[in-house]
Amino acid sequence: MIMLSVDTTSQSYAAGRVVGGSLAAIVAIVLVWRLTTAWRNPSPSNAAEAAALGRVRAKRRALIVAVTVLIAAAAAVKATTS
């Protein structure tokens, strides 16, 4: 097996794990941001809805930003502990 010859105590192995985990977190953040674009930015059907939608947009954007910060924090914790 080739896995038996991998030195899991080397700096290169640790750096690869950090880069791989960070890359996965970046991909997850980009996917969350792109897939929720329509949900974050609803369009008003009339002028009366426009003011209410401003508050809805702000709340939804804050929720998505919180989720992305949570993903980034989890990736940072995983990177520092590996």
Image (tube, grey):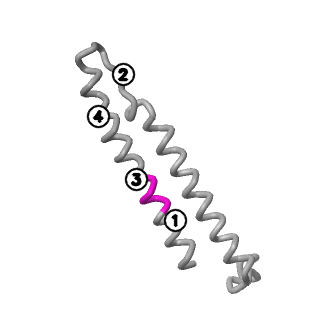
Foreground label between 2 and 1: 2
Percent from the top left, x then y, of residue 22?
60, 62
Which is more N-terminal, label 1 or label 2?
2
Foreground label between 3 and 4: 4
Tell me the tag on residue 75: 1
State the residue position of label 3. 67
Residue plotted at (52% across, 51% down): 28
Q: CA distance from mark 3 to mark 4?
A: 17 Å
Percent from the top left, x then y, of residue 73?
47, 65
- Three-letter amino acid code at disc 2? Ser
Q: CA distance from mark 3 to mark 2?
A: 23 Å
When asked about the image quadrant of residue 57, the answer is top left
Foreground label between 1 and 4: 4
State the residue position of label 2. 43
State the residue position of label 4. 56
The reply to whether the C-beta atoms of the residues labelled 2 and 1 are less than 8 Å apart is: no
| Label 4 CA crowd tier, 10 Å (few <14, some 14–19, many 20+) | some
Left or right: 66 in relation to 33? left
Q: CA distance from mark 1 to mark 4?
A: 29 Å
Tell me the tag on residue 66: none
Vertical side of 10 occupied by 77: above or below: above
Residue plotted at (55% across, 76% down): 80
When asked about the image quadrant of residue 55, the answer is top left
Residues rendered magenta in the picture? 67-72
The reply to whether the C-beta atoms of the residues labelled 2 and 4 are less than 8 Å apart is: no
Vertical side of 32 occupied by 21: above or below: below
- Three-letter amino acid code at disc 1? Ala
Q: CA distance from mark 3 to mark 1?
A: 12 Å
- Three-letter amino acid code at disc 4? Val
Magenta region's main secondary structure?
helix
Q: Quadrant of the N terminus?
A: bottom right
